[in-house]
Amino acid sequence: MPLIPLHYTDLVLAALLLLVNGGLSVRLSLGLERSLAIAAVRMVVQLSLVGLVLKQLFALESPWLTLAAALVMVLFAGQEAMARQERRLVGWWAYGLGTGAMGFAALVVMSLALTTAIQPDPWWDARYAIPLLGMVLGNAMSGVSLSLNTLTAGAVRERAAIEAQLALGRTLWVALRPVLRHALRTGLMPTINSMAATGLVALPGMMTGQILSGVDPAEAVKYQILIMFLISGATGLGVLIATLAAARRLSDVRQRLRLDRLTLRE
Amino acid sequence: MLTVRDLSNRVLQPASFRVDTGECVAVQGPSGAGKSVLLRAVADLDPAAGEVRLDGALREDMTAPEWRRRVTYLAAESGWWSDRVVDHFADPQRAAPLIDALGLPAEALGWPVSRLSTGERQRLALIRALVQEPRVLLLDEPTGALDLDATHRVEGLLRDALDRGMGVLIVTHSPDQADRLAKRRLRVEAGQVREA
């Protein structure tokens, strides 16, 4: 069954739904109409651009261009993860730590996926690599930013408790353990929840897309399961690396709590 | 016993002093002068330059937890990391007599931390540090939230510890308390520490 192509008039019709939302916002003075409009326009513009870029990328079939696109995605993910931090590590760390953790996690997971499970030919085929990376990175980004936020907020809030333990001669890892555990749990929870609920309530977007384009649902499900594992693997790895590295950065060789290495977002 | 030479950081001007075995030294000065900063620097809770030794041994020659177990800092505002009081004591048996000596009921160990008053917290935090028998205790206004009776009980307990050879560096705003406990005093003003 071929995919039913969409016309621009179809999109305009669907956009009318947004007008209903906007109307509601005005009527109930929710003050959301502006953000709604901006978000909708950004969505349309960004996706259209991505469509053009992907089309070019697929056509050029260059490993270097594909790699460059992947790198740009990682850098944007790092930027976004940093922008979501209430408190940031001072200096280069604020950006480098999250970006590095996500980049490494994505590299490991993508290498595994492209060399074992999917094996496109050539292995760097942008048609597979880029959309997979996008899904993996998007989820890792949420997890990393959540866990870093929880860690820094917890360290600041629990400062008296942490330092009381340090002062009594406990090691930093013991003193920091509750905060660290909370941060790791918070970062991994969305991934665990989405795995648990998937299929019952929401059909994942990628699977829906494959089914819409005519793929046998059983095949689409297999792909989706693979993706879910890749996502949880990358999120787990990224969250672990970022949180442990940040905890290390919040301390020093003499196992002090170094909150002076955090700044509040201005 | 504890010798400090040229201890300095962002707040402190280079400070040198000593605390002998069984000696109590009072630290006095206006609020914000750097008294807590001084104690935290000695406990190695904040980075500071200079040389700090205990019985001749340089603090950098032992791990930070080892150092802080011997030279223990007690903050003015006590910290609690678990729900129940008893969870904060490695050996609750040893805390029991001290709890009695400070006029707290024996059941206090079983209480949740959330029901403790500021004064009860302060006394229990002191006991928590004392039962570990550090060589030097760095006290930051340990009786700030206590009435006169409780203050005297705390001082009695500190005198016992001094008799056993513990060194004490105590920040206090009360000249009377300094008179009662300490023979020597350090004056801290705008980050400058000098013998008074």
Image (cartoon, coloured by chain):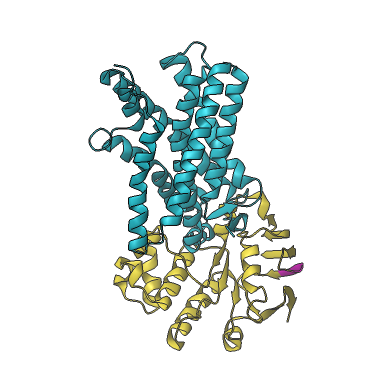
Chain colours: A cyan, B yellow
Quadrant holding the C terminus of chain B: bottom right
- Give the residue displayed 46% in from the left and 13% down from the top: A120
Which of B167/B187 is in front?
B187
Q: Is residue A247 above or below residue A236?
A: below
Report if residue A76 is visible in the image: yes
- How many numbered tags mark residues here? 0
Residue B179: image location, x then y, percent: 61, 86
* B15 is within the stretch colored magenta: yes
Q: Is residue B22 above or below residue A254?
A: below
Residue A144: image location, x then y, percent: 48, 42
Which of B125/A220 is in front?
A220
Q: Is residue B15 above or below residue A20?
A: below
Q: Give the overall secondary structure of the magenta segment.
A: strand
Residue A95: image location, x then y, percent: 60, 44
Which of B75/B22 is in front?
B75
Locate residue A40 relative to residue B47 in the image: left or right: left
Seen from this angle, which residue lies furthest top?
Answer: A121
Seen from this angle, which residue lies furthest left?
Answer: A200
Read off the magenta span: B13-17
Which of A242/A45 is in front?
A45
Locate residue B147 relative to residue B28 in the image: left or right: left
Q: Quadrant of residue A53?
A: top right
Q: Quadrant of residue B55?
A: bottom right
Residue B1: image location, x then y, percent: 66, 65
- Give the residue displayed 44% in from the left and 86% down from the top: B147
* B76 is within the stretch colored magenta: no
- Give the residue displayed 48% in from the left and 76% down from the top: B157
Report if residue A147 is visible in the image: no
Q: Is residue A232 above or below residue B133?
A: above
Locate residue A248 relative to residue B78 in the image: left or right: right
